[in-house]
Amino acid sequence: MTNNGLFISFEGIDGAGKSTHISALAQTFEAQGRVVTLTREPGGTPLAEKLRALVLSDAMDAMTEALLVFAARRDHLQQLIEPALARGEVVLCDRFTDATFAYQGGGRGFDLKTLSYLERLVQTVQGLAVDFIRQPDLTIWFELAPSVAAIRLAGSRVPDKFESQPLDFFTRVSAGYLQRCDAQPQRFARINADQPRDRVWGEVKRAVQQRGWLG
Ligand code: TYD
């Protein structure tokens, strides 16, 4: 945390049902007088939204995809996330770097060492005393079996490039998330998304309360 700014990211495979909980958490923080910046990746700034449109629709190799999402992330951090955190705001971000490790790393099979290098390069914040790598203070991972997510997604809208991937792609994406969660368990709240919505919401709220960030 910086100046009491709070950075929370939300992750999960397509269809895991993040959106309603992100809005509910924003309202909960606002009701307690916090200023909330709601944002998403890829995206969040005019430039990053242009890159998002390319990443979600155009065919490209895994390295190009990784470079574009990290370029979008760099702009997002510089223009929106870091300034909001410096003002002490709560930043709620629909996906962040764990999605790159899960989708480009797990799903596409792109080299994890290169992703780690890019993560360090893009997310290093020059501090007064020491530099540090910006990471979410908390990552809420909505965990759902790919077969269940596929049923939820079916017929809901025209699928984008990722949503139209086969089941085994999402099995690899899930494994990618698990690897990130296992590597930094204290940063993650792992939530079973295969429950009624109010139960999931209860767990989201509890994860934030347990850290002392909500009354
Ligand atoms: P998503 O967050 O699911 O938004 P929507 O609900 O509007 O579809 O879509 C973003 C997609 O981009 C999702 O399929 C995951 C993918 N993605 C990556 O492949 N790499 C990344 O680094 C990020 C942030 C997202």
Image (tube, rainbow, N blue to C red):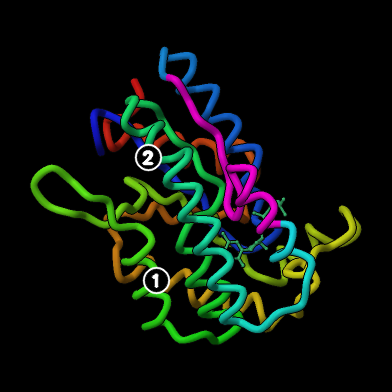
Q: Position of residue 7 (x, y in %)?
A: 38, 40
Please name the amino acid that badge 1 sits on. Leu
Give me the residue at 58% from left, 29% from top.
24
Which quarter holds ligand 1? bottom right
User: In this rendering, is residue 43 above or below 183?
Assistant: above
Which quadrant is the C terminus positioned in?
top left
- Answer left or right for 169 relative to 25: right
Q: Residue under circle 2?
A: 82
Q: Position of residue 110 (x, y in %)?
A: 52, 85
- Residue nearer the viewer, 175 or 86: 86
112 in the magenta segment = no
Q: Position of residue 164 (x, y in %)?
A: 80, 71
Q: Does dot 2 land on a helix, a strand or a loop? A: helix
User: In this rendering, is residue 98 above or below 157?
Assistant: below
- Which one is earlier in the sequence, the residue at label 2 or at label 1? 2
Give me the residue at 28% from left, 37% from top.
211
Please name the amino acid that badge 2 sits on. Glu
Q: Residue under circle 1?
A: 118
Which span is picked out in magenta? 35-52
